[in-house]
Amino acid sequence: MRKFTLMAILAFSFVVNAIAEDFKTAGDGKSWTMTALSETAGTGVTKNGTAFTMANTVVIAAGDHFQIESGITVCMGEDVSLEVEGTAGFEAAERVLFTRTAEGVSPNAVYIKGETEKAKFKNIDFEYAGLKCSAPKGLEADRCTFKYHQASKKHGSSAVNMGLSGAEFLITNCTFSENVRSAIGGAANSSNSITIENCIFLKNGTSNLNYPQINLTCAPQVIIRNCYVEGAPQNTRVGAIVVSDLVNVARNPHTLIENCVIKNARFGIALYSNQKAVVKDNLLLNNNAETNPNNGGSGINITDASGQQETMITGNYIEGSLWGVTIIGGKTINLGKTGDPTAADYNPGQNTFYNNGNNGVVYDLYNNSANTVYAQGNYWKTAGAQTVAGIENVIYHKADNATLGEVIFTPFSTADASGVQPAVSATSQESEIYTLGGIKAGQLRKGLNIVRKGGKVMKVMK
């Protein structure tokens, strides 16, 4: 009896170990679905109605295809991935959910590795699991959601994790909320062109580590447009958007951040190192969660010790930051150059600054570089009546410290071009009220109303 029991235990252990092993398809040209996997021995996939459970990682081999079925739920176990080395179709007619099997379980990711086609995702919801891509063609995601992603070396640090330099990404109409670290990011030594458009980012970075909600390496084309980014003030180390090239991997890098609402983060936008950037028509509010002004808190921060960055900042409304715009290095940082409308560096300015400062001192613009900075055509709302003396009080530059470069701010605007009214208070957690100008509100998913006039954000309501 004792011998039989031992043999039974050994046999049971063998079965458990067999199930725990990854399953890889044969690469013989077959098309796989979750149903097909559940009907195949050794996959570790089981089916219960429209719900599937993955007990171990499944690899779709090169030469094979994976097709998602609409309206299903896929529950993934500890460290489990669905890896696609072949081709994949993740465009679902009805919403699909990838989630964990139980509380406390940390699944890995849907991991795209295929080399022949760009994978496309639509109507896919990710909870706890992430989306990784090291495929050379990149991927596209539309109308997907990403929530509660658990970062680790194995899972990747971002809910959408990019890799392999040269791959291109398109992320549209997606929502990212309460992920542990960044919503979208990649390796510092990987340069990926990416367009992020019409997306919502809510309180990502719940671990409160030094990872911004959007964390990108410079690339030939980085576009962030028509997005809503809101931080959680208790996450004092989490900024909103960073585009940087820390190890000099990008070639001919260009960045555009346009028509976004960015609020309640440690900082708003940070552009580091060599790139040609345009920051245009954004609404930056109360990005002041940083507890030490010496460590951050800018609405827009430009840092480039190499002296190569060329950035144009135009049409933005910046309110309630510890520092409005800070400039540390760079080649030409242009906040308004109105002298010659036909010049290549012409910039009408039209930035509005209001109530940016710390420790009782206003810092709407801080030129902490030796460069001469043009900032003409702007409205310095904090200064009240627009006079040279009043504006000098809200700018820090050569007039305050002879080692710094001069800010040329005349001529300035005598009217607020933004149409935005100040927030009720810098600490208010309620939605701010702005002028409507008779423009109808447009719906931006998840109950956020965006009112625009002439392409510029005029109002945000929940």
Image (cartoon, grey):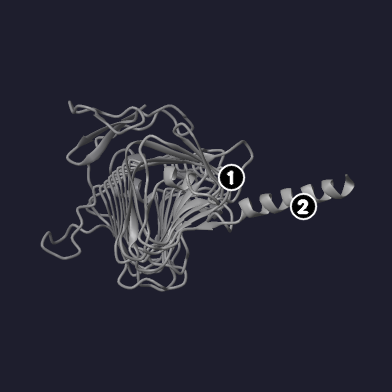
- Of 109 and 25, which appears nearest the observer? 25
Question: Relative to residue 24, is residue 6 drawn left or right?
Answer: right
Question: Relative to residue 18, is residue 358 drawn left or right?
Answer: left
68, above or below 29, in the image: above
Q: How busy is the neighbourhood of tag 2: few (under 14 within 10 Å), some, or many (20 plus)?
A: few
The mark lying in front, picked from 1 and 2, is 2
Q: Position of residue 196 (x, y in %)?
A: 32, 50
User: Residue placed at 18% from the left, 60% from the top?
Assistant: 346
Q: Could you tell me which quadrant the C terminus lies in? A: top left
* Quadrant of the rendered image containing residue 176: top left
Disc 1 is placed on an element classified as: loop
Disc 2 is placed on an element classified as: helix
Q: Is residue 216 visible?
A: yes
426, above or below 395, in the image: above
Q: Position of residue 118 (x, y in %)?
A: 31, 58
* Residue for badge 2: 10
Q: Are marks 1 and 2 in contact (CB under 8 Å)?
A: no
* Quadrant of the rendered image containing residue 352: top left
Q: Could you tell me which quadrant the N terminus lies in? A: top right
User: Residue placed at 73% from the left, 51% from the top?
Assistant: 11
* Residue for badge 1: 77
**Which callout, 1 or 2, points at the residue further toward the start of the chain?**
2
- Of 337 and 45, which appears nearest the observer? 45
Q: How busy is the neighbourhood of tag 1: few (under 14 within 10 Å), some, or many (20 plus)?
A: many
- Of 306 and 11, which appears nearest the observer? 11
Q: How many marks?
A: 2
Q: Position of residue 166 (x, y in %)?
A: 35, 68
> Three-letter amino acid code at disc 1?
Gly
Q: Position of residue 98 (x, y in %)?
A: 47, 41
- Of 138 and 338, which appears nearest the observer? 138
